[in-house]
Image (tube, helix red, strand yellow):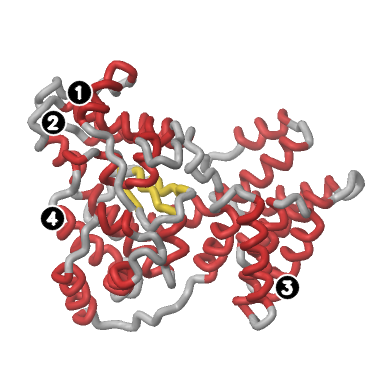
Amino acid sequence: MALVIATPSLASQGMDQLKLPAIGAPAGSGELSPSDERQIGEESMLQIRGSRYYLDDPDVSEYLNRVGYRLVSQAPSNSYGFLFFPLKVPQINAFAMPGGFIAVFSGTVLAAQDESELASVMAHEIAHVTQRHIARMFENQKGSTAMALGSFLLAVLAGAAGGSSSGDAATAIMMGGQAALLSNQLKFSRSAEQEADRLGFQILVNAGYDPMGMPRFFRRMQDRTGRYESASYLSDHPLTVERIGDMENRARRIKGDFARKDNFDFRLVQARLLALQSDRRADLESVEKQLSMGISHASGEDAAVAHYGLSIVASRLGHVNQAFEEAKKAVEIAGRGSLMLKKNLAQARFAVAGAAEKQGALEDLRQLAAQNPVSMMTADAYISALHSLGRHAEILRYLNSQSAF
């Protein structure tokens, strides 16, 4: 896919329409402090959250941040307050923004074959942040820092605005990834990519993931370019035979038991993203058909994942009774204490409950949130249920009692 880039001329035209962050360094100095990076990232996130590509889903976000912070804990420097967030884009891509904000495309999660492969992409982006590669790019700009930031934020604004199918600049940030975010002048250097490979690889291994996850995923992307529409990632993070070979050699030297085991929550998130990636009814019905066909020859966790996915699809199609039945089957088959499955069942029960059963269903959600005080997805489910009942005073009391938020 051709990249859409915020060109310097486009950036100049939109400069006076941007509200640039008040950074500490004077224009032209090229200096960018960690606090400047954070401010740029936070202001950029305001634009991204307004985009139709932003996936506001606490379940997926909680999972990504759980994996992300498992990796961050092994980074040589974790002074950044990282935030990992999903985008509803089928391409394989991920990008790091200033200040520790890391986007993961839904296509990346769906293309990965296990959690180690997904973690390898996230570890690479974490390395870009901790090594301050973005700050270095700004420092290397010959023009003013303000103009570089203008190009950056203009690309964010363009993506947030949505766009036509003609591939204009309005689709830049989401469809072009890092290249569109930072413009042609702000791409990572080859040495920065190699540094992110090597540090990301060490972070991956130290976090207990399969060291072959990184070269396995990247090599498969090269082999299957087009099938997963992975050209976006390969354009932003060009993979050479040398780089892949370097990662494979490093992985072979690692001693230890790194069995390829699929994390159950990883598979549940994949099923959830299948159901959330598109808002078109025809796409949802296609996913429903795909999952239903898979159940006929599935058992154990495979069947539980399929029933969970069907529950999410049914809920999105407005079939609340079917969503509840599928949610029950997923929990019964799994035979394990998956918080994602239990939360989905409690939500589905609340959705189908009549007036007489509503309070009991609400109590299930309240208890689930109380038992998992640091879980944003259980808190969100409970708050959403209270909101649907118009019990806003209780929402405020609950939020005021939560020190974790």
Work out whether residue 70 or residue 126 is closer to the camera in this orientation and state it: 126
Q: Which residue is mark 2?
A: 31
In the image, residue 199 lies at what x, y percent?
20, 61
In the image, residue 347 lies at what x, y percent?
72, 52
Q: Amino acid at mark 1?
A: Gly
N-terminal-most mark, 1 or 2: 1
Query: Looking at the image, which residue sits at the far front?
Result: 166
Callout 2 crowding tier (Cα within 10 Å): few <14, some 14–19, many ≥20 = some
Work out whether residue 54 can be spotted. Answer: yes
Residue 127, compared with residue 327, is above or below; it is above
Q: Is residue 249 left or right of residue 85?
A: left
Q: Which residue is mark 4?
A: 190
Q: Is residue 59 left or right of residue 95?
A: right
In the image, residue 358 lies at what x, y percent?
84, 46
N-terminal-most mark, 3 or 1: 1
Label pair 1/2, CB-CB below 8 angstroms: yes
Q: Secondary structure at mark 3?
A: helix
In the image, residue 363 lies at what x, y percent?
77, 49
**Residue at 74%, 70% in the rendered image:** 329
Label pair 4/2, CB-CB below 8 angstroms: no
Q: Secondary structure at mark 2?
A: loop
Q: Amino acid at mark 3?
A: Glu
Residue 263, compared with residue 142, is above or below; it is below
Residue 109 quadrant: bottom left
Label pair 3/1, CB-CB below 8 angstroms: no
Label pair 3/2, CB-CB below 8 angstroms: no
Q: Amino acid at mark 2?
A: Glu
Q: CA distance from mark 3 to mark 1?
A: 57 Å
Query: Which label is found at residue 332?
Result: 3
**Residue at 32%, 49% in the rendered image:** 95
**Residue at 33%, 53% in the rendered image:** 1
